[in-house]
Image: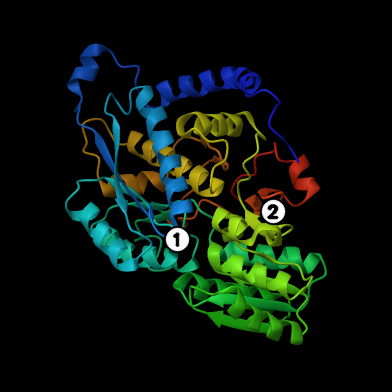
Amino acid sequence: MPSLPPSRAAAARAIRPQRLQVIALLVIALGVGLTPFAAQAQDASPIRLGLVGPMTGGSADFGQSMVNGAQLAVQEINAVGGYLGRKIQLVVKNDQGEPAVGARVAAELAQKDQVVAVLGFCNTGVALAGLPALQKAAVPLIVPCATGSPVLQQVPAAQSYIFQTSPRDTIQAPFIVSQAYAAGARKFAILADTTPYGEAGLADVVKALKAKGLEPAYVGRFALGLTPEQAQTELAKARTAGADVLLPYTVGPEHGSIALARKALKWDVPMTGPWTLSFPNFIQKAGSAAEGVTMAQDFIAEPTTPRRTAFLLAYERAYKTRRIPVPMAAAQAYDAVYLLTYAILQTPPGKPINGAGIKAALENLDRVYYGIVTNYDRPFSAQDHAAITANMLVMGEVTNGRVGFANAADAKNAAVVKTKQ
């Protein structure tokens, strides 16, 4: 598995030419090389982008990672002059992981805060509650965190203002099933919570199994707040059903209860699932029971390319930490800010920046953005608002309390940037 160089200072020196190149490209791409007279002719007011996610509560780990990634991108863009001399300003709202709060703050962003676009939502249920207000107001939303399949299914893409830079469960579930199937699994035990995320994930897994001619060996349902003792009851039933792989679809703490129950029952069955198994609130709760658990990922926090190395070091410097709580959330939000900025750049001179123009630009971006997760070459179209495709996914694995590459081949080829199919 790739590792950071022994000296972080040496790593910084190694990537300095790359960072200078990125800054130079930004200067050109964002149009900051204007003459003083041209700059004076431009509107100097900030361009306001909304950002909504759970900064408190049980989902705060990936909510804060999303916020940090977005803020890091904004800082970089503003450092080279913003867009035509106008700074990007984030209007941050805490949805607390609650659908009712998400609906309220989305309406505030759409109606009162004068934002031209929004990034956000980490919980599928909260996203489903909040996105109608943005869709009605024709305010583009990029979802860099929530992965539930229903997020992009509410409105036909041609009319939709909703875009996504996180890997939908419609691609995660088949990928997870295929990986487990290739390893020999045939009898899948699915444990899903009763939130919209769990409901949609269960449906996606069942569909993926059906495509391989399989039915679940066992399906268990539970509300959030599952304890290890309650999980033991479900796992005992799954074991009796002859399950040879455990596939939970829930969030971090509940994953932790399931892993602890598996350990208590001394049931040595593989545990695999969606990206939520990479969350620190799972790994910390499960402790040694998390070791060897695998999950779908589109970004592993390793310095596999100069661009990713620069991002990891910039995050470390900005937030004084060597570990991003949820790297995928941070990287996907970082990339989403740049995609929105590139879309704003396509506004014709003298024309106002508005939702309809940003939507049209996102669907037809005229330049490649070399991002952290991937290189975005026309990531969206009028018929397709999902930036991430199945070929970009790899399996992560918890080893010594951290998530790395599960497969040696993925680690070896990690410097090859996979792009949208």
CA distance for labels 2 and 1: 21 Å
State which quadrant residue 312 falls in. top right
Specify the quadrant that holds the N terminus: top right
Judged left or right of residue 110, residue 371 is right
Which residue is painted at 27% across and 48% down in the image?
355
Which residue is painted at 53% across and 47% down in the image?
325
Q: Is residue 206 visible?
A: no
Residue 108, given in percent of the width and then of the height, sits at 21, 55
Callout 2–callout 1 Cβ contact below 8 Å: no
The answer to whether 8 is drawn above or below residue 315 in the figure is above
Which residue is painted at 44% across and 44% down in the image?
336
Task: Identify the amino acid type marked 1.
Answer: Gly
State which quadrant residue 269 falls in. bottom right
Which residue is painted at 63% across and 61% down in the image?
286
Q: Which mark is residue 58?
A: 1
Judged left or right of residue 268, residue 118 is left
Residue 39, given in percent of the width and then of the height, sits at 24, 19
Badge 2 is on which residue?
398
Q: Secondary structure at mark 2?
A: strand
State which quadrant residue 104 falls in. bottom left
Q: Which mark is residue 287?
A: none
Residue 133, given in percent of the width and then of the height, sits at 26, 62
Q: Is residue 333 visible?
A: yes
Q: 139 or 368, which is in the foreground?
A: 139
**Can you name the residue that lies furthest to the right here?**
184
The answer to whether 387 is drawn above or below residue 32 in the figure is below
